[in-house]
Image (cartoon, rainbow, N blue to C red):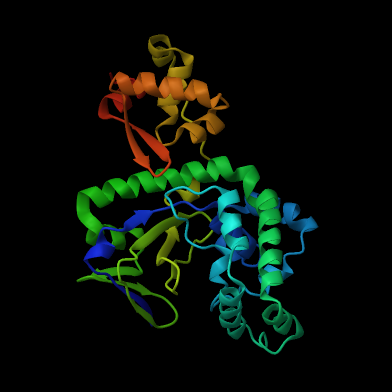
Amino acid sequence: MAQRLHLGDRDLLRCRFAVSPLWETQEAVRTLTRPDRFPYHQGRLERMREAAAGLDLRPLWRLMPRRGHSPDFWAPPPHGATAEIGDELARVRATDPAAARRDLATALRSVRGGTESAWGRALLAEPARAVAEAADLLERAWHALVEPEWPRLRALLEADVAHHARRLAEVGLGGLLPELDTRVRWEGRTLTVDKGGDHERWLRGEGLVLMPSVHTWPDIVTGVEEPFQPTLVYPARGLASLWTGVPERAPDALVGILGAGRAAVLAALAVPGTTSGLADRLGLAPSSVSAHLTSLRTAGLLHARRYGREVVYRRTGLGTALAKGKG
C-alpha cells in the first residue's frame, strides 16, 4: 500500500520547505499516547507528561488513531517557510464549519464506534463549536508542551531545512526525496510513499510542502487530501543529539581575535541557525546577535540564505577553519 502524488511542471516549481509550530504541537499531544515515538527523549517526555497534567486532552486523543485519519484542519500546512503559532491558530479558527464537518466525519470513520458515539454525533452536529474547542485546546497544549522548548526545537528544524535546501540545489528533487526517508521514492514525476492506505492524487500546480518534524519519528506523514497543499512530513535530522548537544565553546584564541560575542556566534554555527535561534541558544539579545552576524558575514566567515521571513546562517569553509583553530 502506498500514497502517490503525480506532479506536473508547475508543481515542480512550487516545492518548498516549511516549519510549523502548530504541527509540532499536534504531534506532541499524539506522542503522549505513543511513548514508543520518543525513546531517545525520555527526559522531555516526562516534562511533557507533567505539563499535560492540568490539560484534558481527550477531545484531541479521541481523533488520533494509530492508523487512519486525524482532522486536517487541526494543523493545515503553513503558507510560508516559517509560521507563527498565532497565525496558524487563527487559520484553524477560520475553518469553514461545513469543511470541518466533512473532515471530522472522515476522522470519525477511522475510530471504532466514533461515528455512532455520543461525542462523535455532537462534533458533527456543531462543527463550528468543534473548531473553536479544538483551536483553544491546541493553544493550551502549545503553551504547556511546546513553547518552553521551542527555541531549541526551532533551531533543529531550521538546520534541517538549511541542509536539505542545499541538497536540493545539489542533487535536485529526485535525488533529495529518497534522502528524506527510505520509504520515499521518486519515479518519473511520481512521489510514492510506502505506508498504510492507498491514495492517489494528480496535482494541478499546488506544489508540495516538505516539512521536518521533531515529534513524528519513526513515522512519515503525508497530507494529500484536498483542499490543502500536499505535504510530506519527515523526521528531522539530528534528533538523537537534540537534548544532549550544547553550543560549541569558542576557543580562547578565537575570542582573542574576534571578541567574545562574535566568537560565540561563530562557534555556535557548527549547526546552521537564525538570528532568533542563536539569541535563544546563547542567551544574547537578538540585536547583538544580528550585529555579530553582519560582521562575520562581511568578513567572509558566514553564508546567509533566506527562507520565507527567516535568514539561515552557516559557516563558510574559512569560518569553519577559524572556529576549529585551523585558520
User: How many numbered marks does the figure carry?
Assistant: 0
Q: Horizontally, is 221 left or right of 47 in the view? A: left
Which of the 4 quarters of the picture holds residue 34?
Answer: bottom right
Return the x and y of residue 102 as percentages of the image width and height. 57, 80
Q: Nearer the viewer, residue 280 or 224?
A: 224
Residue 242 seen: no
- The quadrant of the rendering that contains the C terminus is top left
Above or below residue 168? Residue 252 is above
Residue at image x 43%, y 69%?
222
Residue 57 seen: yes
Return the x and y of residue 39 as percentages of the image width and height. 57, 58
Return the x and y of residue 141 as percentages of the image width and height. 68, 56
Q: Horizontally, is 312 left or right of 139 in the view? A: left
In this view, which residue lies farthest toward the top?
Answer: 256
Which of the 4 quarters of the picture holds residue 54?
Answer: bottom right
Which of the 4 quarters of the picture holds residue 70?
Answer: bottom right
Return the x and y of residue 179 as percentages of the image width and height. 31, 58
- The quadrant of the rendering that contains the N terminus is bottom left
Q: Nearer the viewer, residue 1 or 279?
A: 279
Residue at image x 45%, y 69%?
223
Above or below residue 280? Residue 220 is below
Residue at image x 43%, y 19%?
262
Residue at image x 43%, y 60%?
234
